[in-house]
Image (cartoon, grey):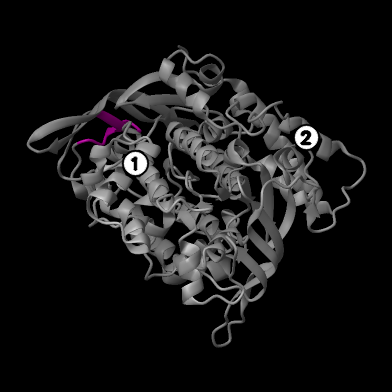
């Protein structure tokens, strides 16, 4: 299969040049219980100047391990064989002092989670300054000026403020921009982007992808993109290497692989990707919707919030009536209004998708719905309990009828408790069920989330991400709640695992008929599940209607931007959508 890059894919990028990195027959093994366990097997690829190569595969496929071996960042129990040549120099076997000359300066990494990669006790600016001074030996003032310039280059809203901020004071998208600024501070020849957009909102993700694309063109850098998101691959990459169980099963141009995937695993990955507008009955042509928005001569008349007429199903289980939620001020810091006069109802047996960017107030609403946050004004009814003036006894009463599935199952499960203990804890505390009866309930819940009963004796670290998320769902459903709050439960999962978890949630919702508030930033995911969609923006409810009303005929400009930002796993269509998105953003700026 040809691996050359089509001209159409590089039309907006610097002309592809000589190979920057050449990986040949790379093998990586780990010593586990005195045995060598192969993780990467005979992997070969090359990346040229100005080119983006995507390493695609599920968790455990070896894509991150292979990329970290380039910089010698693997643990001591790793054994690496083969060849990794960077601009003609063999990197494998270099001493640590020699490798430091390449790390950061010649080869840089954008890590998946900036909050853990950035040092929490130093400001963002000081960390960029440190990188510049180590590699260039410039003065503190020169490094400061360059750092602020870099933050402006990555389109940080307020570079000076970001320079003096600590990582926790920035949003997720801003932290990712800060990490990119640090990564490109030395104009690296190779940029390794390890899942750079996994936990970001779709609009922020689109901005970050545009940024990486532009930087690759301006700096002439080679980019190694590690991801499981085929929409991101279609949007950014020139060539693709599909990995499975440590081996490259398919290689080629993005256009060739997407149009005619040869390997069954590649077809499975592509089939598992949720496509916006393809769920339910008649498919929605989202691109046509966006074209209509761009080409319309008359501006869309918008009255906030936009409420479509929708049929009600069942009795109300969760009702926000003119709810305001504020975080109290401290000292000179004023109170922050996170939710501003929101009306939202979830009925028995329906799934309402709550969509919006980070900071829009959607998670705040979800936490208030189960009594974890008090409301400032308005009325909140949860499973028949008035939580407008919540007390500890009222919250305990709500918790018996409401469950929550958190975004990160690894951090929400107690590492010292077995799976059986974690699932059974709500039954023990709320209903006093013990002994054999408790074990039978736990086994029944494991059956409902399609996991073996033997998993009850395992600990969380022994399970994969998708399995841990199933445990989180089982625990949330232990008390057979009338309301389930699902807070970004699939954002960090592989596409195939995500598809399985979404199908599981659909089956469980049909079986138990609970009301579900599904919080997400991914419209394609909520398209699979939701009966109705609510769009949050800056604490307000921008638009609320059925799935078809929101996706077919979005009235609010913010909803239109959200839809325009969703990447599709089709390189040609995605290129058209990227241009449409820019037109919508330009129209919004002109207005």
Residue designated by label 1: 444
Residue 469, relative to residue 320: is it above or below?
A: above
**Magenta stretch encompasses residue 91:** yes
In the image, residue 314 lies at what x, y percent?
67, 48
Question: Of tags 2 and 1, which is closer to the observer?
Answer: 1
Residue sitting nearer the eye, 231 or 378: 378
Q: Say which quarter of the image contains residue 128.
A: bottom left
Q: Residue at x 62, y 81 (%)?
A: 334
Q: Which mark is residue 509?
A: none
Residue 113 visible? The answer is yes
Residue 501: in magenta span: no
Residue extent of the magenta highlight: 83-92
User: Magenta residues: mostly which secondary structure?
Assistant: strand
Is residue 418 shown above or below 384? above
- The percent coordinates of residue 206 (x first, y second) are 60, 44
Residue at x 42%, y 34% (from the top left corner): 497
Sequence-first tag of 2 and 1: 2
Name the residue at the bottom extreme: 331
Disc 2 versus disc 1: distance between alpha carbons?
A: 45 Å
Q: Position of residue 572 (x, y in %)?
A: 64, 24
The residue identified by callout 2 is 289
Q: Nearer the viewer, residue 176 or 275?
A: 275
Give above or below for 334 relative to 558: below
**Does 207 sit left or right of 554 as displayed?**
left
Q: Residues within 10 Å of mark 2 (few under 14, many from 20)?
A: some
Sort mark 1 into few (<14), some (14-19) or many (20+) by Cα contacts within 10 Å. some
């Amino acid at each position: 299969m040809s691996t050359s890059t089509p001209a159409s894919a590089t039309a907006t990028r610097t002309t592809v040049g000589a190979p920057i990195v050449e990986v040949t027959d790379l093998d990586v093994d780990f010593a586990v219980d005195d045995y060598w366990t192969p993780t990467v097997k005979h992997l070969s690829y090359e990346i040229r100047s100005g080119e983006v190569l995507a390493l695609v595969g599920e968790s455990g496929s070896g894509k991150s391990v292979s990329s970290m071996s380039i910089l010698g960042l693997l643990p001591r129990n790793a054994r690496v064989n083969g060849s990794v040549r960077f601009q003609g120099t063999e990197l494998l076997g270099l001493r640590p002092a020699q490798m430091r000359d390449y790390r950061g300066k010649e080869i840089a990494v954008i890590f998946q989670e900036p909050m853990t990669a950035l040092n929490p006790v130093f400001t963002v600016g000081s960390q960029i300054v440190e990188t510049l001074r180590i590699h260039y030996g410039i003065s503190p003032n020169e490094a400061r000026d360059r750092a602020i310039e870099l933050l402006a280059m990555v389109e940080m809203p307020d570079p000076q403020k970001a320079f003096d901020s600590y990582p926790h004071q920035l949003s997720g998208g801003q932290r990712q921009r800060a990490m990119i600024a640090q990564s490109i501070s030395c104009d690296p020849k190779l940029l390794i982007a390890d899942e750079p957009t996994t936990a970001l909102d779709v609009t922020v993700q689109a901005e970050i992808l545009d940024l990486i694309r532009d930087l690759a063109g301006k700096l002439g850098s080679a980019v190694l993109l590690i991801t499981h998101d085929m929409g991101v691959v279609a949007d950014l990459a020139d060539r693709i290497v599909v990995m499975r169980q440590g081996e490259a099963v398919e290689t080629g141009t993005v256009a060739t692989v997407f149009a005619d995937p040869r390997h069954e695993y590649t077809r499975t990955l592509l089939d598992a990707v949720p496509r916006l507008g393809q769920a339910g009955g008649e498919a929605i042509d989202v691109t046509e919707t966006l074209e209509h928005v761009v080409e319309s001569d008359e501006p869309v008349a918008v009255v906030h919030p936009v409420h479509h007429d929708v049929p009600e199903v069942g009795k109300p289980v969760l009702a926000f009536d003119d709810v305001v939620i504020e975080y109290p001020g401290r000292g000179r810091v004023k109170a922050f209004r996170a939710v501003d006069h929101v009306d939202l109802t979830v009925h028995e047996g329906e799934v309402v998708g709550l969509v919006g960017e980070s900071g829009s107030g959607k998670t705040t609403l979800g936490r208030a719905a189960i009594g974890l946050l008090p409301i400032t004004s308005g009325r909140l009814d949860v499973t028949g309990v008035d939580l407008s003036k919540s007390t500890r006894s009222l919250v305990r009463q709500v918790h018996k009828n409401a469950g929550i599935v958190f975004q990160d199952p690894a951090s929400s499960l107690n590492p010292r408790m077995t799976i059986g203990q974690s699932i059974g804890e709500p039954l023990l505390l709320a209903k006093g069920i013990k002994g054999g009866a408790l074990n039978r309930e736990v086994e029944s819940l494991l059956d409902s989330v399609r996991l073996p009963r033997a998993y009850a004796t395992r600990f969380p670290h022994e399970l994969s991400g998708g399995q841990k998320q199933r445990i989180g769902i089982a625990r949330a459903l232990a008390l057979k709640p009338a309301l389930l709050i699902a807070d970004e439960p699939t954002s960090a999962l592989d596409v195939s695992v995500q598809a399985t978890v979404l199908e599981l949630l659909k089956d469980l919702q049909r079986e138990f008929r609970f009301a579900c508030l599904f919080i997400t930033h991914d419209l394609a995911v909520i398209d699979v599940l939701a009966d109705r969609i609510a769009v949050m923006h800056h604490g307000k409810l921008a638009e609320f209607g059925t799935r078809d009303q929101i996706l077919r005929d979005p009235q609010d400009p913010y909803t239109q931007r959200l839809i325009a930002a969703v990447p599709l796993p089709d390189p040609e269509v995605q290129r058209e959508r990227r241009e449409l998105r820019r037109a919508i953003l330009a129209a919004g700026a002109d207005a």
